[in-house]
Image: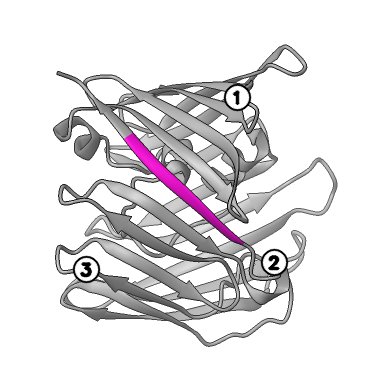
Amino acid sequence: MKIALTIYSLLFVSTITAQINDADAFYDGSYSNSFIRTQRIKSITVDVYVSNSKTSSSNFYFNKDGILKKATIIDSGGNKVNDYFFQFNKHGGLFAIKNFNYEIKKLHTVFYTKVYKGDKIIIDSSTDLPIKNEYIYNKKGQRVQTNIIGNSGYPIQNKRIIKYIYDSSGKLFEVSEKFYSGINDTLGYLISHTFITYKNSKVIREEEKILIDSDTPWNKGSIEYDYDNSGNLISIKSKKVASHFYNYDYRGLLLIKKTIMPEDFNNIISIDKYKYSFFK
């Protein structure tokens, strides 16, 4: 789980800004703390089921400002597995995650280095992985390029460069990604080239033009998005990566998240069930 936290923060650079307040968002810091604060949410319990069997539970604890302070992972037998303690900087970005593992009885801390220019983050790195993100913006404050640089201490330094193009109304509509193998590679090769389609200001499709027959997470293939009448995202469908389906209550609180893995992973289905407690 410790590794997954860092991977979410550093490797998977989302092109879509639809915000889902689920367990993944709590761990990578992309959840809406204003939504948590407005709903006066004190804690969220997420029970995970695979093949109709409960495999684990995650308990997330927030303060009255909507800031995540702690997460506890419990296995199917009711035993504590991990405690995570979260610290955020003044910009709301993750500063540190402390993980206490009950099996080995050790505390591990991951620190996140984030450099800002004004309110824009321009550098992001972690003590857990030899990866650094660099962000470039245009005069309008829109992110136009992300450089993901990997250096494991060897002479070869790999990097991904992601470029973003916006339409005249300011909506992101084209994203291209190139991979460069080593510092002497000045050409790179295109690994992903997506075009984004909107309907009523909501993203409904990412159409991938570069189809790579490999397990790389960088090229996610084409993805389709659907929403309910309240504007909540209810499905993310893909043939190459996991598809997700969401159910909410009348307040917009997530109740169920269903994940279906692609055919290469035997279409395994997992279901996350959400329960809430509130401040008085």
Please report contact status of discs 2 and 1: CB closer than 8 Å, yes or no: no
User: Which amino acid does the dot numbered 1 rest on?
Assistant: Gly
The residue that mark 2 highlights is: 180
Is 149 positioned to the left or the right of 152 in the image?
left
User: Which amino acid does the dot numbered 3 rest on?
Assistant: Asp
Which residue is rendered at x = 28% and y = 19% of the image? 63
Above or below, comparing residue 15 to residue 192 in the picture: above
Lower sequence index among marks 3 and 1: 1
Q: Does the magenta-highlighted stretch encompass residue 272?
A: yes
Choose between 39 and 207: the one closer to the eye. Answer: 39
User: Which amino acid does the dot numbered 2 rest on?
Assistant: Tyr
- Which type of secondary structure does the marked residue at label 2 adopt? strand
Which residue is rendered at x = 73% and y = 12% of the image? 105
Which residue is rendered at x = 70% and y = 70% of the image? 266
Which is in the foreground here, disc 3 or disc 2?
A: 3
> Residue 228 bears which disc, if any?
3
Choose between 103 and 205: the one closer to the eye. Answer: 103
What distance separates the C-alpha of mark 3 from that of mark 1?
Answer: 35 Å
Per the rendered image, the range of residues in magenta is 269-275
What distance separates the C-alpha of mark 3 from that of mark 2?
Answer: 40 Å
Q: Position of residue 130 (x, y in %)?
A: 70, 40
Q: Position of residue 257 (x, y in %)?
A: 42, 55
Q: Give the residue at the far right of this rendering.
A: 154
The residue that mark 1 highlights is: 78
- Which type of secondary structure does the marked residue at label 1 adopt? loop
Please report contact status of discs 3 and 1: CB closer than 8 Å, yes or no: no
What distance separates the C-alpha of mark 2 from that of mark 1?
Answer: 46 Å
Tell me, yes or no, if residue 187 can be seen here: no
Q: Does the magenta-highlighted stretch encompass residue 236?
A: no
Q: Quadrant of residue 32?
A: top left
